[in-house]
């Protein structure tokens, strides 16, 4: 994938993140591309780079060279051909009904502006495909051929002007595949201004929708907390308190992540003010010893020396003596939710969701590979991903801004 800021730069395997490699592998194995098409589409250098990724990370057997030669002889994979034929069949069956219904609905509900846009697109498509006589169709719908040609010219000029936008979107999405459009616009805006491209946030929404590049939301929820135990629980100190500075409040939670080898558990500790993930640990079990490792990483990476509150749910790991001893030894005040209520630890749950819905998208083969993906994802989250709640700054920018 090409960086829009630079000309062609020689790259090595290390320049591509594991998350990007897994995304490319998934698209090739799904049939969206052959491996050579994927290499060209994403601007990946090397003659067989994607093939190496397929053999290392793929779910299918890519050891047979015959398979690749057969797929490369055609410009489209069998899956692509099936999709194209299905679309053509559906278009042929519905064309007349849809065109009639579009005109009726636009007249009744949407107003003339949208009606003209849809009709122009339909008329021009018929002319290009030589299915209808342009002059006759224009007369039926109250257009002139000259006016339609002028509209097409304006439309093509706009498409030409927006050509660099796709490269920018693909560049940022190689790091953050499911980043939302508002955050994406914030990241792209300096480059858009530099190139003199006039495109607002709503315009970017329209562009991504037209290109089929809008991100569809995903929701999932699994309970990982056991709060029914005899260990001491601590009161909720955050009911009427908002963090005032970085490292004022640390929130912790555990979420599950799957690989081909089984289910693993990711323990996270996050600064409530800056949203920076300060500590994490990936393990095969939800033991207190594993959760403590995430806490110790947070303490090791502390930048300020003021008092801190640690907030978590009432899980047995957080109530354990081993975990509470670390808090006491570093003068960190414990705080817990009242019973099992995920909304009382909403920020930690939100960070879990961001990682799983925007970064950890592809199932790895084993814990070692998953650990690499987690490391890369948390680095990108802390360093590159802007937050609406932080005024479109990154967690690291907010975390260290007072100390600089």
Image (cartoon, grey):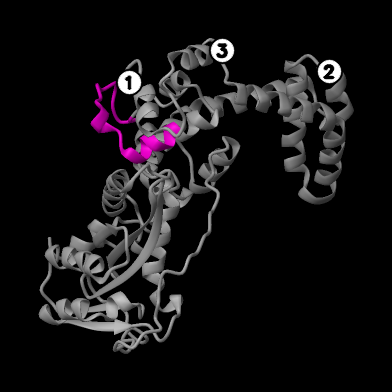
Q: Are marks 2 and 3 in contact (CB under 8 Å)?
A: no
State the quadrant of the C terminus.
bottom left
Tell me where the magenta segment starts and ends, as one range: 3-25
Residue at 36%, 68% (x, y): give it.
Answer: 348
Neighbour tally class for label 1: few under 14, some 14-19, many 20 plus, Cα within 10 Å: some
For numbered disc 1, what is the local secondary structure? Answer: loop
Q: Position of residue 243 (x, y in %)?
A: 28, 77
User: Left or right: where does residue 231 sit relative to residue 211?
Assistant: left
Q: Nearer the viewer, mark 2 or mark 3?
A: 3
The residue beneath circle 3 is: 74
Query: Does the image show residue 1?
Result: no
Residue at 55%, 25% (x, y): give it.
Answer: 157
Question: Disc 2 to disc 3, how far (Cα)?
Answer: 32 Å
Is 10 colored magenta in this rendering?
yes
State the quadrant of the N terminus.
top left
The residue beneath circle 1 is: 45
For numbered disc 3, what is the local secondary structure? Answer: loop
The residue beneath circle 2 is: 132
């Amino acid at each position: 994938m090409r960086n829009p800021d630079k000309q062609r730069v020689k790259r090595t395997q290390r320049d591509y993140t594991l998350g990007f490699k897994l995304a490319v592998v998934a698209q090739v194995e799904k049939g969206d591309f052959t491996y050579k098409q994927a290499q060209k589409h994403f601007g990946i250098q090397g003659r067989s780079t994607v093939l190496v990724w397929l053999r290392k990370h793929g779910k299918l057997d890519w050891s047979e060279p015959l398979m690749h030669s057969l797929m490369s002889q055609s410009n489209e994979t069998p899956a692509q051909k099936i999709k194209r034929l299905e679309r053509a069949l559906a278009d042929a069956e519905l064309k007349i009904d849809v065109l009639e219904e579009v005109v009726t609905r636009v007249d009744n509900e949407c107003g003339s502006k949208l009606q003209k846009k849809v009709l122009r697109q339909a008329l021009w498509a018929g002319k290009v495909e030589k299915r209808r006589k342009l002059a006759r169709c224009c007369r039926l719908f109250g257009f002139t051929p000259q006016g339609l040609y002028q509209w097409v010219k304006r439309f093509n000029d706009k498409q030409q002007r927006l050509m660099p936008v796709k490269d920018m979107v693909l560049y940022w999405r190689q790091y953050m595949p499911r980043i939302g459009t508002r955050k994406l616009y914030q990241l792209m805006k300096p480059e858009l201004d530099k190139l003199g491209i006039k495109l607002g946030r709503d315009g970017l929404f329209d562009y991504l929708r037209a290109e089929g590049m809008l991100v569809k939301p995903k929701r999932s929820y699994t309970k990982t907390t056991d709060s029914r135990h005899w260990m001491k629980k601590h009161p909720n100190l955050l009911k009427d308190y908002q963090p005032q500075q970085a490292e004022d409040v640390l929130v912790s939670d555990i979420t599950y992540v799957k690989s081909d080898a089984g289910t693993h558990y990711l323990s996270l500790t996050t600064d409530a003010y800056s949203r920076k993930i300060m500590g994490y640990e990936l393990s095969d079990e939800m033991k207190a010893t594993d959760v403590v490792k995430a806490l110790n990483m947070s303490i090791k990476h502390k930048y300020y020396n003021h008092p801190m509150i640690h907030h978590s749910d009432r899980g047995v790991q957080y109530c354990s003596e081993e975990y509470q001893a670390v808090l006491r030894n570093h003068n960190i005040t414990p705080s817990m939710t009242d019973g099992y209520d995920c909304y009382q630890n909403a920020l930690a749950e939100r960070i879990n969701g961001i990682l799983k819905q925007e970064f950890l998208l592809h199932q790895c083969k084993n814990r070692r590979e998953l650990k690499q993906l987690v490391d890369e994802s948390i680095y990108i989250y802390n360093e590159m991903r802007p937050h609406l709640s932080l005024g479109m700054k990154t967690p690291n920018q907010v975390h260290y801004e007072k100390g600089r």
